[in-house]
Image: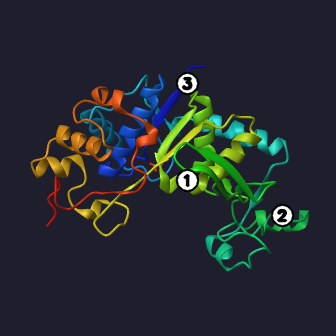
Amino acid sequence: MNAAGRFAPSPSGELHAGNLRTAILAWLFARSTGRKFLLRVEDLDRARAGAEAVQLRDLRAIGVSWDGEVVRQTARGPLYAEAISRLEAAGLTYECFCTRREIQEAPSAPHAPQGAYPGTCRNLDAAELEFRRSTRPAAIRLRAGVAGYTVHDVLHGEFTGIVDDFVLRRNDGVTAYNLAVVVDDAEQGIDQVVRGDDLLPSTPRQAYLASLLNIPSPEYAHVPLVVNDDGARLAKRDGAVTLADLAAAGTSAAAVRDRLLQSLNLRAGTLENALPGFDPAALPRGPWVWSSGGASSRR
Ligand code: GLU
């Protein structure tokens, strides 16, 4: 199988400068290591009509190209179901009937890290299970055998994070992100995952799940986020942060691309031209401030 990297946007709206910078980085990581570069639309949840087309158009406009067809998660239900069946057959899942509120209000298990599922439904007896099944549809959770797991990240080194009995399939039948991402990366031959470092905390869960499914973990590179003047993660409300808004303010897609490349200490111009100068070890490690001055024209 060919090695590949990828960009996997959720089509919940337009990409902003932070998303575009991550896409450029994912492209540079993949291309600089001779990998293919794939595009996967993570539309299981939060998909907005028309958003995908705009995202793909904007990626092309800044020079991010990909190999083969775009893959959409909503077309891959059978793959996710098959993985969950394998885990079920191995006794590694259970049904959970908890509401969000019940989870928040449940006393946490001794020594359980904060934010971990307290295990309320882990050991329901047959009578309890039967009763609960009559009350509401079940989510499927992983019966995790560890409380934490360590991954290696190109930029962060060793990172250990919580693994709890996380959800694999929600009670509305939608496959959970943590399961889908693991199954998709493996099935698509993706062995390099470059994404925003806000996703680092969920990576140990994914790597642990991959180990249970006998899938080798990909190489991870969690890249710094773009933040606003106040240091908060960039968002639409931060003014002109999408290509459309920036174009309306007189900034071309090529100028945005150049500004993003320069923020990475790379040469302005095409991504291909920036490639020879790309060195992960030399990347800026902190968040980059998208100033409301500069190319954007806020207020
Ligand atoms: N779809 C996720 C997002 O847009 C990214 C997931 C990933 O790269 O693994 O935040």
Per the model, the C-alpha gap separating discs 1 and 3 is 22 Å
Residue marked by disc 3: 3
**First in sequence: mark 1 vs mark 2:** 2
Q: Amino acid at mark 1?
A: Leu
Judged from this view, the residue extending furthest toward the left is: 250
Most foreground residue, 33 or 45: 33
Q: Quadrant of the N terminus?
A: top right
Q: Amino acid at mark 3?
A: Ala
Q: Secondary structure at mark 1?
A: helix
Residue marked by disc 2: 129
Q: Of the residues tagged 1 and 2, which is closer to the observer?
A: 1
> Position of 192 compared to 128: left or right?
left
The picture quadrant where one finds residue 182 is: top right
Q: Secondary structure at mark 2?
A: helix
Number of other residues with Cα within 10 Å of mark 3, as a class: few under 14, some 14 to 19, many 20 or more: some
Residue marked by disc 1: 200
Q: Position of residue 99 (x, y in %)?
A: 65, 70
Q: Position of residue 2 (x, y in %)?
A: 56, 20
Q: Are marks 2 and 3 in contact (CB under 8 Å)?
A: no
Q: Position of residue 108 (x, y in %)?
A: 74, 75
Per the model, the C-alpha gap separating discs 1 and 2 is 34 Å
